[in-house]
Amino acid sequence: MSGNCPATACLPTNFLRQIMGMNDIINAIKERVGLVAGPLLYNAVIIVGICIFLAAASFYWLFPVLRAIDQNISEAQNIEAQNADALLNLLLDETFSHLIHFGEHAYEDRGIEPRASVLSQSRPDFLNLAVFGTDGKLSAFTSRNGSQEAPYKLSDSVNSSYFFQEAIRNQRYIGPVLLSAAGPSIQIAQALTKDGEIVAVATSEIDFSLLWEVTKKIPVKDGKIYLVDKLGTIIADPDIDRTRSGENLKYRNVVDLLVQGKANVLRDNYKNENGENVLAFGLKMQKTGWGIVVEKNEEKAMKQRNDTLLVALVFTAASILLITLLILSTLRLAWALVNIDREKSERERTIAYLPDGVVEFTGENRILGMNPAAKNYLNINQPLPDEFYVIESAEPVKGFERLKKIFFSTHKTEGGQGSSYEVSFDHPERLVLQIITVYIKGLGPLKDQRYLKIIHDVTHERQL
């Protein structure tokens, strides 16, 4: 066939593989990536789905975790404030119980003044003690500093003395904290009863230094507890100098809200006197009206929350990176498919204008495609059916008789790059076709193998 070898049949096998194997490349990419149609749209849907999933995952675990951490911080501060409240109330209850006990025995044989002296000795924080009758007259007075004059004087109108009014109604009276050179003190008053009847009012000035210790006894990790009175003035702080300052802290939101009557303030952020950013929790004491503020270093208190946020940010950054890589891979794949389609179109246009016929088929004789010249030589005037196989033992499909004959001719000679033989047709006119079978690719199953049949018209050559 060397002298009569058609130009198409003499093309290098690798070139034919590159041209005719493009369909296989496209099909392989589509099968592996799962892109049947609309690769950009399909992958865009996947990417959007991943973004929605990541956002939902963040809402599902991140925000509840952050809320739980915030709640744990507030609960821990609340417990510390409740402990301080309980300890303060215990000290105050004990102080009033001593007054009540004093009243129960004050009118026995020993008299009021001896009993008052005993109370002063047993409670060193009692700076003095005064007893007034129900008519407002002073019945007894004792002082730790030896003073003979009671600091509590009733005016001509008993009703003008607030502590007396409260006590005579059998209500506890706790006055404001007073700061003096001798130290802080508060006045308390309690009704004294005998046989269930109020017979007198006892009032005392109490050294407040003992209550200062409460702010030191309640352990607060990375923070402290301080107390403010009804007006927002600081009355107790672990720093004694700060306690003695008498500073009003209403400029802090947590203190202002407590002064306004709010039962508790879950969170306030501010910079304290040491320049630290702190988280504050406020609790109002029901019995005294004082405010208890638990203050924690914000950075240390929020460490767990910040660590969780860091993990979330790393997770988000990794997710964004993966999505970016997915987008870039999708764009590269889409561009590759576009190039493949373009090359396929160019190949098809090139083959379409070849004078020789070209038929592409698998090892199972499944026809994958043919150019117009092949259809003309084989007298095929209809579209190629899907999944069309050429089977030797079966009757040829109407309109494809010549196609079957070029596959199963009995006149074959070996040589060249594949089997080469001639096939003749007499109707409607004599036609002699040289058929050259060329191997393209595939070493696996027959369905994956690819072959070409090159059809060259040698009718005129054979007539010479």
Image: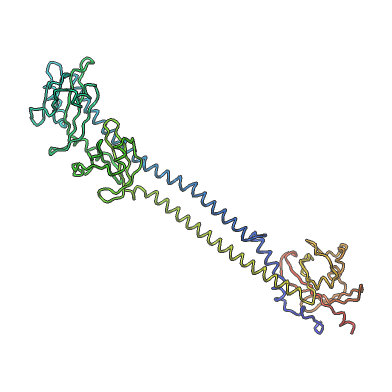
For the C terminus, the image quarter is bottom right
Percent across and percent down for residue 86 are: 29, 33
Q: Quadrant of residue 214?
A: top left
Percent across and percent down for residue 281 are: 33, 41
* Nearer to the camera, 456 or 419: 456
* Nearer to the camera, 67 or 289: 289
Count of marks, rendered view: 0
For the N terminus, the image quarter is bottom right
Q: How is the image coloured?
A: rainbow
Percent across and percent down for residue 292 are: 28, 38
Percent across and percent down for residue 81 are: 31, 38
Asked whether, in this view, residue 211 is left or right of residue 296, the answer is left
Q: Is residue 459 above or below residue 281?
A: below
What residue lies at 37% left-to-right and 43% top-to-bottom? 73
* Nearer to the camera, 21 or 316: 316
Q: Is residue 261 above or below residue 47?
A: above
Q: Quadrant of residue 265?
A: top left
Residue at the farthest top position: 195
Asked whether, in this view, residue 49 is left or right of residue 82, the answer is right
Asked whether, in this view, residue 193 is left or right of residue 382, the answer is left
